Image: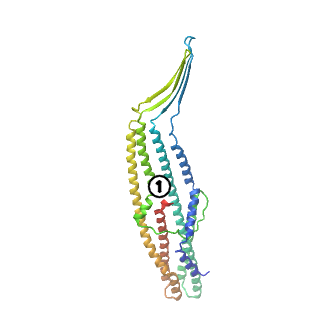
Amino acid sequence: MNTKFLYTLSFVLLFITNIKAQENIDKVLLEIAKNNKSINANNQFLETSKLKYKTGLTLENPKVEYEYLNGSSDATGNQKEFYIVQSFDFPTAYLKKRQISEKQIAQTYFKSAAYKQEILLQAKQYCIELIYLNKKQVELKARFLSADKLHKSYQKKLKNGDASMLDLNKAKLQLLTIENEVRTNASLINQFNQKLQEMNGGIFLNFRDLSYPLISDVPDFQSLINTLKGQDPVLKSFLKEQEINLKQVELSKALALPKMEAGYRSQELLGQKLQGVHLGITLPLWENKNKVKHQKAAVIYSELQVDRHQTAYYSQMRQLYTKYERLSSSLEDYKQLLATSNNKILLDKALKLGTISTIEYFMEISYFYSSIDNYLQLEKEYHQVIASLYKYQL
């Protein structure tokens, strides 16, 4: 196959964006969400937590006692006593406990979602890294074919006396350098596929995409922050913690009210039977001391946690957006430059016609290759920062 065609094909692939990439990345993320052992373990922990927070919402177990006492003589007789009693907190305490339970379960869902998002973001970053490496491999293979052709050409020229050994050595050095880059890049592709396999619960995913996912227009920073802020599960978790602590204050106040008990009691002695109602009350003098103060302090702490996270969130998003703007501008400059010129073809013609020396050719081609490498690197970083900006949608 013509090496010029191969190189042109690899050059065109630098700018291809196909919806198939989005489908493939989405498919990989769905598989990892299903097979990742950490996510599965976290899902099981979620179910365990739901059951945990549903306990302790009902009344305490009733207490039942029965006594049979033998008398020392017939005149004394035998004594029988039966006793059943149910103790309970002030009624509003049970309502508060149930409300707290519902909020704790909701908070667990938010924590689970945040944990899952971090794993899926890492997986998406690996996919983007692999797209970059796959595209680079196409580029490097095209360079290798071109360098191999040039090396063989100089071997023939040397035999015919049209080239020097220095020229041949330069061509051979370029060939060996590119060959090493191909091997190194192939090794990196294998490493990142193994990382995806590990994240997929040991199931291999041979990710070979060459095109990045489609990206809709990114809005201005304030619009973006307003849209994504409501999707942040970490913030939702902190806000829910604040609600829980407020309810804990109400519960502490309810538990500071008297605890009551009611029941039935009967007694038989000397042929007589006594029976009636048992009523009791526990005065909360010491047991709940400082509990309300403790919960109020927890409310203040949770408010500070919300404020701290919002500040950190804004700062992180601002940094990501600034990086996005910088990369977007640089990427567009490189894209316009590389789309309107193909220095490789021009340099090959100039070398063939003898208008430039071998040294000039290898120097200029290295600049051109460096520009393409920079473009590929910028393109990868651009898509990685977009993925980080929109991680809350994973």
Q: Residue 147: in sight, yes or no?
A: no
> Tag 1, which secondary structure?
helix
Question: Residue sitting at 55 percent across and 76 percent down?
Answer: 10
Task: Tell me if residue 88 comes above or below residue 9 in the rendering.
Answer: above
Task: Tell me if residue 125 comes above or below residue 271 in the rendering.
Answer: below
Q: Amino acid type of disc 1?
A: Pro
Task: Tell me if residue 392 comes above or below residue 365 in the rendering.
Answer: above
Q: Position of residue 295 (x, y in %)?
A: 40, 42
In front here: 158 or 106?
106
- Quadrant where the image shows the N terminus: bottom right
Q: Position of residue 387 (x, y in %)?
A: 49, 64
Q: Position of residue 348 (x, y in %)?
A: 53, 84
Task: Give the number of marks.
Answer: 1
* Colouring scheme applied when the structure was drawn: rainbow
Q: Residue 103: in sight, yes or no?
A: yes
Give the quarter of the image for residue 70.
top right
Q: State the residue position of label 1.
A: 233
Mark 1 neighbour density, 10 Å: few (under 14) some (14–19) many (20 or more)? many
Question: Residue sitting at 42 percent across and 38 percent down?
Answer: 254
In front here: 8 or 86?
86
Asked if residue 1 lies left or right of residue 388, the reply is right
Q: Position of residue 256 (x, y in %)?
A: 41, 36
Task: Tell me if residue 79 comes above or below residue 1 in the rendering.
Answer: above
